Image: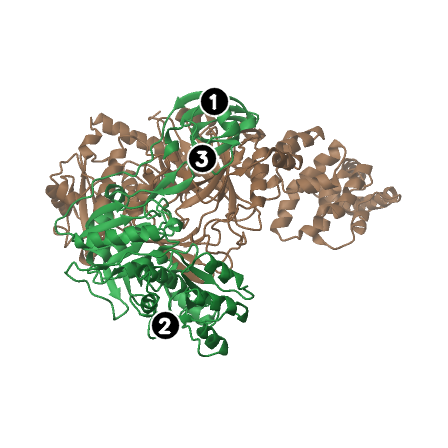
Amino acid sequence: MSGTTDPYRGYRGPTRALMQRFDITVWCEVRARTTRGVFEGLLLPRSETSDELHLVLKLGVGYNVGIRHDTVLELERIGYREAHYKIPEKEFPFDPTHPRVKLFGTGGTIASRLDYRTGAVIPAFSPGELYGSVPELADICNLETEKLFGVFSENMGPEQYLILAERIGEAIRAGYDGIVVGHGTDTMHHTAAALSFMVQRPPVPVIMVGSQRSSDRPSSDAAQNLINATWTAAHGPIAEVLVCMFGPTSDRYNLLHRGTRVRKMHSSYRSTFRTLGDIPAAMVEDGIITPLKDDLLPRRADREVLVQATYEERVTLTYYYPGMHPDVIDALVDRGYKGIVIAGTGLGHVNRKIYPALQRARDAGVQMYMTLQTLWGFVQMHVYETGREILGLGVIPLANMLPEVAFIKLGWALGLHPDDPAAAQRVMTTTIADEMTDREPHDGYLIYQGGVPEIREFLGKVWR
Amino acid sequence: MLDFPDQPFGALTRQDYDILGFMSGLEVHQQLLTNSKLFCRCPAGRRVTRVDAEVLRHMRPTLSELGEYDGTALMEFKTRKEIVYLLERRSVCTYEIDDTPPFEIDEEAVATAIEVALLFDLNLVSELHVMRKQYLDGSIPTGFQRTAMVGLAGTIPFRVPELGVDRVLRIRQLSLEEDSCREVSDVGHRITFRTDRLGMPLTEAVTEPDLVTPFELQAAARLLARVARTTGKVRRGAGAARQDVNVSVAGGRRVEIKGVHYHRRLPLLVHVEAFRQLNLLRVREALADRTLDPSVLAIPDRGLPWETSDLAADMGGVLRHTTHAPLREAITRGETAVAIKLPGFAGLLAHPTQPGRDFGHELAERVRVIACPVDPQFFADSDHRGPGPSEREWREVRRELRAAAEDAVVLVWVPRDDAATAAREVVLRAREAFDGVPAETRQANRDGTTGFERVLPGPDRMYPDTDTPPLPIADRVVAEVREHLPETPWARADRYLALGLSTRTAQQLAGAPWADLFDAVAPSGTAVAERVATAFAQRLPKYRRSGVPPEAHTAERVAPLVRALESGAIRLEATGRVLDQLAAAPTANVGSILDRYRAGPDDASRFELALASVAEAAQHMDGRSPGTLVRWGMGELMPAFLGRLDPALVQDRLTAALSAVASEGTR
């Protein structure tokens, strides 16, 4: 971080000039005589996204306050006290009887600290730091960590998927008993899908985990998520790519979701991750893993894993809307896109107006696949004439594959077979990791509606 | 000072409190009268008992901005509580239960907070920074309270004639923050909260510790409440204003008593706390006299104390058949009974601290709060007679611990997982006795005593809220609020003094809820104003208590009376009676009520007739003293002439007439 040694960190324009005029830097204890009275405190760095008009003082009582530059008559330096924010780092204890777990960090807020530059939360990650904040981990495994990237979830992409898949493969071959991937939650389901395709038939659990409430707060879900994810990786019997996040919003159990059937469904709830169109793979709570599905792939002793880290980036996901003009598709074709996943309405429909564009795309060799905006249910293009017409235009239905999963899979399939469209198409229509299922169980679609008496009764009885 | 005798409340003078070095300050939490909560759009002020759903959470300590774990935070974590929140659909949304980030801060609340800050003469900040103040007790689901500093360092006039106080009160700060949950129950490892109140905006006003007697403290609390209420934008009623009190005596430490709802309870509480501190200082002195130091109470941080330390022993085996039933039953249930040796402490656990409590209670309370025993009886110590193990059993415990006669021994029995914490807390609290008074937060009991709540938090528990941007408070906004500032109680009192009211009446009226009515009817002339103010003070609270509707005494209904008093059409003595009549008939025509007291042209002739008939009747009342007769006669005459004739004149005429009758009789 370049700005860390800047004595005026975060201050620009008039506030910076003011500090220079009175020979004051950040971390100075100052007495500010202003038109609004006298204020005393520690001058903190200012977030760069905040305005350039205010100084931030930390008062003796712990509060921060902003002092507007043009109210300041005089700044007097009365001390200097630089703060070093540090998670108490203790060496992670080694226990020869514990399984070895590798934790890959990608960024996100699984463990974090505050950043003065942005006023935001930045990750903290070493085993020592993790042990300092979640000492329970030492009772679960011998943890080793490796920070692969320091990016927020929204900045994860194909470049990172490839590295992550390769490194997971290496860790498996190196004999780790389980893999944990710390990840921001926004695009965790994209990465989970990518890993589900790129790392096939791992012999050990590959568990993705994150937190919806940053770990700098007492009510964070981070510790429980991390404990349960680490437990699942170290001791769990399921050798699959799974997402391990809160089941209910209450601090009770975590759910393990298959990487291809999971989706973030709420912008901020702890229980945001849900399995769609199926039931979750398992529950985990207090060191007990309860399988929910009966087709889970068991942990194996061997070290064999099929890693296929490849990706074609010129694919896209198009969310159809009524009245869509054909030029939207035309533009993609003109820009050289090789594959388009459409999220269509209902059973997999788009309007007639874009038929010519679809035809043109097909003729240009662009692969087109149909998924659903409804998220739940199957693409069924034979039911209505519209569907049959679209099929005739070369759009291939993808059953109940989630749109984001189809998008990731298409990039991967075209990466695997860049010069063989038929092979790529075969990959797309062949189920690899439950991304399409033969059947939807009766309880694969449960969105409870609040207010209904039976649900009220349920909520009265259960810590949801 | 240590030999200052323990005194009951009410027996001490201001000088006595001076000798004790009594100091106190206030933190007044005042809910604001907004439509919405502070950071979400839930309605504010709904109080419910209905439960639609429950959520379970735990709290973990985190790091503060400057890199230290806060002491309170660590303590709360030791308690490992299950925290259950009761949710009611209409009063709470996903924000309060920490499943949605905060929305924009409520502007109404910010404006009111600025207004209150200006009334307190505080230096306003230029930019509000929302901070997170950690509370791991579960009272806020996020684990922190969002709070922002609004203003600092102000003074307001502090005049309390009856206490001889006439100085300024220094206000340290005012912050705007969200309210916490209401606790429903706290049993063992589970604490349950209601969330209706959670997130409501409140201001926290903090005074400097300048209040040097319990009564000054009470007066200051009332003053602060009054100032906030002048805005008309704060909530009233039960729980709408709650005070925390900081108390210390010379050599003691700041102790915070939390959540006192009633001003009248304040003086006793702080008096008792002052003597608790004094007594803890005596315990410290006693330890020093015994040439003990804290090193006798060293105990390892980790492991099971009864395995790692000579100070503790597991007594489950020895006391399996104890005569003390609660202990025996606990052991049978599988709980762990630990004995802890406190070297050199013999006798000190029985040292009194508060009325009916002693130093042993201090240890027990720590265990109760931090180790969460299941059984209400979980503690016994060797300084006490009464319920507990037998003499013989105590001897066995002592033998097990190799405890000498000068050592005190404590027994606690709690569930196995909590036993190590319990034993360590006993030792930690005993060690604090060498320091005298531990800085802590205490809960107020009804009888004026207090109980341990938690270790007093420091500034370390404050860190910036990353979910909310700083909010500039522009000069323009401040100017706007300043322009519409309500009159302060002291400005009001000054105005009433200028009107000629006595100091006491003026001060009382300035703080009274009927001051607005007084201003609306605007009595002119000192005598009328004093009479109206006094009559209001004597009567209006009584009317309110007995259920008279406020409509009985609107300005429209009271003003004609005041005008009649001013013009002399009705004499001042009738003021109270007229108010009573208005109360008795809230919808009756005011004019006809006033007519009963208005002087009329035939008053003089009617009086002569009435006087004659009273004098006549007096002739048949033999054997009464002249005084009795006059009082009787006044009672007969005055009701008909109240407001019309001067009672002194009536009495003079009556006295003369009666003595004429008497002398006639003699003749």
* Badge number at residue A63: 3
Left or right: B545 as drawn, with respect to A10: right
Please give the residue where the numbered disc 1 appears in the rendered image. A20
Chain for colour brown: B
Please give the residue where the numbered disc 2 appears in the rendered image. A443
The local crowd at label 2, few if under 14, some if 14 to 19, many if 20 or more residues have their Cα within 10 Å, is few
Discs 3 and 2 lie in a common subunit: yes
Left or right: B402 as drawn, with respect to A3: left
Q: Which amino acid type corresponds to the residue marked 1 in the rendered image? A: Gln
Residue A276 spot, x, y in % from top left: 37, 66
Instruction: Write down the quadrant of residue B421 in the picture.
Output: top left
Q: Which amino acid type corresponds to the residue marked 3 in the rendered image? A: Tyr
Chain for colour green: A
Q: Which one is in front, A61 or A224?
A: A224
Q: Which amino acid type corresponds to the residue marked 2 in the rendered image? A: Asp
Please identify, in this view, whether the residue under mark 3 or under mark 1 is nearer the observer.
Answer: 1
Residue A112 spot, x, y in % from top left: 34, 43
